[in-house]
Image: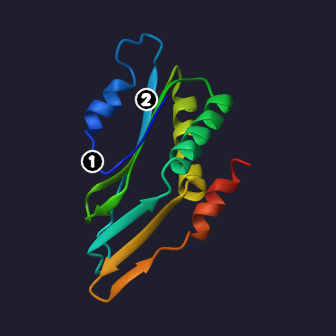
Amino acid sequence: MTVSVQTEDFDLAAETAALSVGRSDVGAIASFLGLVRGEGDLAAMSLEHYPGMTEKALVDIVAQAQTRWSLQAVRVIHRIGRLLPGERIVFVGVASRHRGDAFDACEFIMDYLKTRAPFWKKEESPAGARWVDARDSDEVALAKWE
């Protein structure tokens, strides 16, 4: 398991490949890549976190996934700082023996990350900046795992 909170971009192909390098027990890799949407007049999005607490929350989320499914490797990267439309925000990669475990664990991690990880988003537009509230749809998605 590897968890990173960082300002730097990441190489999607390299991160995905790292999930199975040197392993013969991986039969499936499922991944999620989140991007900054350029909807409306969004100029940028700034993501903030609480250092130490955020990484611990991500480790805890992955640990929960590992107790529910048989996973060979997990990689979570979440970027912070100011990001422009089209830039990568988050990567979740899960390797397992079987696709069902990989798909379910990847979705579970993202659902928990969206609702329980201590990140704060601020959107910038020509009209000014505003903090983004949690969406009800994210809580609904989380409920299916409880």
Q: Say left or right for 146 vs 43.
A: right
From the top left corner, tell me how far across and down residue 111 is, in percent. Answer: 57, 52
The colour style of the image is: rainbow
From the top left corner, tell me how far across and down residue 124 is, in percent. Answer: 32, 77
Residue tagged by mark 1? Answer: 8
* Residue 92 vertical position relative to residue 144 in the rendered view, above or below: above
Seen from this angle, which residue lies furthest bottom? Answer: 127
Residue at 25%, 60% in the rendered image: 86
Q: Residues within 10 Å of mark 1 (few under 14, many from 20)?
A: few
Q: Say left or right for 6 vs 75.
A: left
Residue at 61%, 69% in the rendered image: 136
Name which residue type carries label 2. Ile
* Residue 41 vertical position relative to residue 9 in the rendered view, above or below: below
Mark seen at residue 29: 2
From the top left corner, tell me how far across and down residue 34 is, in percent. Answer: 38, 53
Q: Say left or right for 49 vs 109.
A: left
From the top left corner, tell me how far across and down residue 71 is, in percent. Answer: 55, 25
Residue at 53%, 73% in the rendered image: 133
Closer-to-camera residue (47/43): 47
Name which residue type carries label 1. Glu
Q: Given this view, does label 1 or label 2 mark the residue nearer the observer? A: 1
